[in-house]
Structures are given as structure tokens and as C-alpha cells.
Amino acid sequence: RRDIHGDSINKAQLKDYWDQISDQSFDSRLRTVFDMVDKDADGRITKEEIKEIICLSATTNKLSNIQQQAEEYAALIMEELDPEETGFIMQCRFPLLHLKLS
């Protein structure tokens, strides 16, 4: 979604997207995940976007107990990655989530 507006993409945008999803590096994979969670492509992830991806993942994997606690999990993630309580997580803070979960 980054830098793509409208209903279609051109060949250069498709190549850029393909290169991004094909890159096996940790940073590239993290950026891809960030872009998937950042539904409005504003470069920030909100608590609602986190909650939505938790619910989607839980539904896909038939984890109803996780889905029921999505609000709590989203709040915990925000607490860790948004200590200034700005209401969003920037991409530069996103790798901290992986480090805290490891």
C-alpha cells in the first residue's frame, strides 16, 4: 500500500512490491507486516488497527479465546510500544515488539 493510491498500480510499483515481499531480511519482513497492519497507510499503527489484526488472525486460526481478549492484547502492545501515549506506533518502534516477544 505504501505510495500506492487508487485502484491500480503500474509496473514499477508492482516490481517494488514484489521486491519487498520477496526480500528475506528481517527488516523487510517487519516492514511488510507493519504495512499490512497499517490499513490506512498513514505510517502509524493505532490500537484499533492492532486489535483488528489480532481478531483477523484469531478468526483465521480458530482461536476464539484470543479473539475475545483482542482489546486487552492491543492495549498491552500499545502500552509497550507507545510509552508517550500518542495513540499510535511509528514504524521505527515496531521492531521493539519483536524484541520484547523474543
Image (cartoon, rainbow, N blue to C red):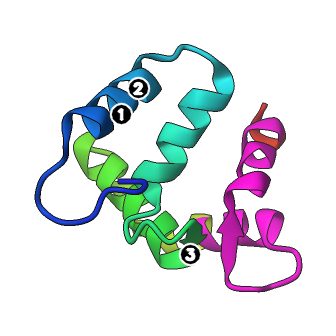
- The percent coordinates of residue 64 (x first, y second) are 32, 55
| Distance in Å between CA atoms under marks 1 and 3 | 23 Å
User: Between residues 23 and 51, which one lies in front from this camera angle?
Assistant: 23
Q: Give above or below for 10 relative to 39.
A: above
> Which is in the foreground here, disc 1 or disc 3?
1
Disc 3 is placed on an element classified as strand
- Is mark 1 in CB contact (under 8 Å) with mark 2? yes
**Does 32 lie within the magenta span?**
no
- The percent coordinates of residue 31 (x first, y second) are 57, 41
**Does 78 lie within the magenta span?**
yes
Disc 1 is placed on an element classified as helix
Q: Which residue is under mark 1?
A: 17
Disc 2 is placed on an element classified as helix
- Residue type, numbered disc 2: Ile
Mark positioned earlier in the residue sequence (2 or 3): 2
| Distance in Å between CA atoms under marks 1 and 2 | 6 Å
Q: Which residue is under mark 2?
A: 21
Q: Give above or below for 94 relative to 73.
A: above
Q: Residue at x 80, y 85 (%)?
A: 85
- Residue type, numbered disc 3: Thr
Quadrant where the C terminus lies?
A: top right
Residue 22 showing in the rendered view: yes
Q: Which residue is under mark 3?
A: 46
- Residue type, numbered disc 1: Tyr
Start and end of the magenta stretch? 74-99
- The percent coordinates of residue 83 (x first, y second) are 87, 75
